[in-house]
Each structure stands twice: as structure tokens, then as C-alpha cells.
Amino acid sequence: MPIYSLGDPGLYEALATKFGYNPGIYQLHIQNKSGEFERIKRLLDDDDQGIMYIGTSEGLTSRLMTLKKSVLAAYSLDGYTVPTAHPCGTKIVQSPRFRERFPFSCLCLTAELCDLGEVGYRENDNTKLEWRKLSEYFSRFGEFPPLNG
């Protein structure tokens, strides 16, 4: 699965080419300086993919660009808190330590389209897939990704 850096100036074009405005599931990760996912300690096990958030959207490219704008705004605020258009931005605004520990340059995304054949896709089926992914995460790590909570 390709990894997309939030700081990539060509992010929109890459996402639009790959996903269009189709429904899908995405994850926000922490990436280390070597370009690998950062291993993050969790309650029951280490998360070797550094997942900070799991989300879904009916229009994947649009949602991922909203996430990027919200997170970028959160890093630009220097302590000034305002609501943002994506929950990740809101959580990051509330946590200066998160911004200190994980610079914007280390944030990246993975995403996949909903398998429309698998689920016999209907509106909101991507939400069921998101919940399944979150449930699997919780079962393994004993907690949800930190920006989902």
C-alpha cells in the first residue's frame, strides 16, 4: 500500500489519481526519518505501523485533503486553539506535546478504496468497514488510536 506524506505538495494529484472521490478507509501514521512507520507503544502491544487515526469517507480524496488542511492549521497555530474541519486537527490543536514529539513532516497517510464487490456497497458501508478496522485495532492493542478517542 502506498504511503503519502502530508507535506507532499503533489498530494492532491496523487490522491485524486489513485482514489478519485470514491468511498474508502484511511489511516494517519507517524513515519520516522528513515521513511518507515514509527513503532508506538500501546497498552497491550507495540503498534509497528504508528497509527494515530483510522477514518473513512464517502469521498476519499476530498476527506484526506480536509485532514491535511486541518492538521497543517493545527501545527501553524502556536498554541492558539480554534475548531478545525477534521477531528485529527482538533485533537492536535489540544496537544502541544503531540506537535513537539511528532513534527508535521513525519505525518503520512495510507488509504484504500472500499471493496465494493466485497460488501455489496450501500451508503454508509464504509462506516461499517471503519468500525471493523477500529475493533481489530482495539482487540490487538487494548485501546483505539490516540486521535480517534
Image (cartoon, helix red, strand yellow):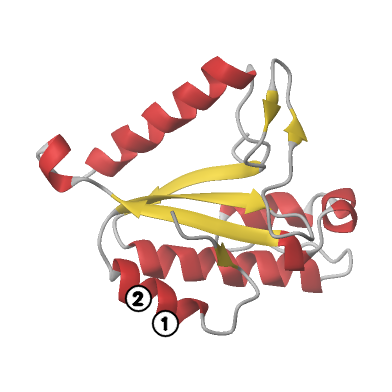
Q: Label 2 to label 1, Cα distance in Å? A: 5 Å
Find numbered disc 2 in the image and state the secondary structure of the residue it sits on: helix
The residue at the point 51 percent across, 68 percent down is 66
Label annotation for residue 24: none
Q: Nearer the viewer, residue 14 or 89?
A: 14
Residue 64 percent location from the top left of the image: 47, 64
Q: Is residue 98 left or right of residue 105?
A: right
Can you say which quadrant of the picture contains the C terminus? Answer: top right
Q: Is residue 42 left or right of residue 24?
A: right
| Mark 1 nearby-residue class (10 Å; few <14, some 14–19, many ≥20) | few
The residue at the point 60 percent across, 78 percent down is 8
- Amino acid carrying mark 1 in the image: Glu
Q: What residue is disc 2 on?
A: 16
Residues tagged 2 and 1 counted as in contact (Cβ below 8 A): yes
- Amino acid carrying mark 2 in the image: Ala
Q: Nearer the viewer, residue 48 or 116?
A: 48
Find numbered disc 1 in the image and state the secondary structure of the residue it sits on: helix
Q: What residue is disc 1 on?
A: 13
Residue 37 percent location from the top left of the image: 67, 48
| Mark 2 nearby-residue class (10 Å; few <14, some 14–19, many ≥20) | some
The residue at the point 64 percent across, 22 percent down is 143
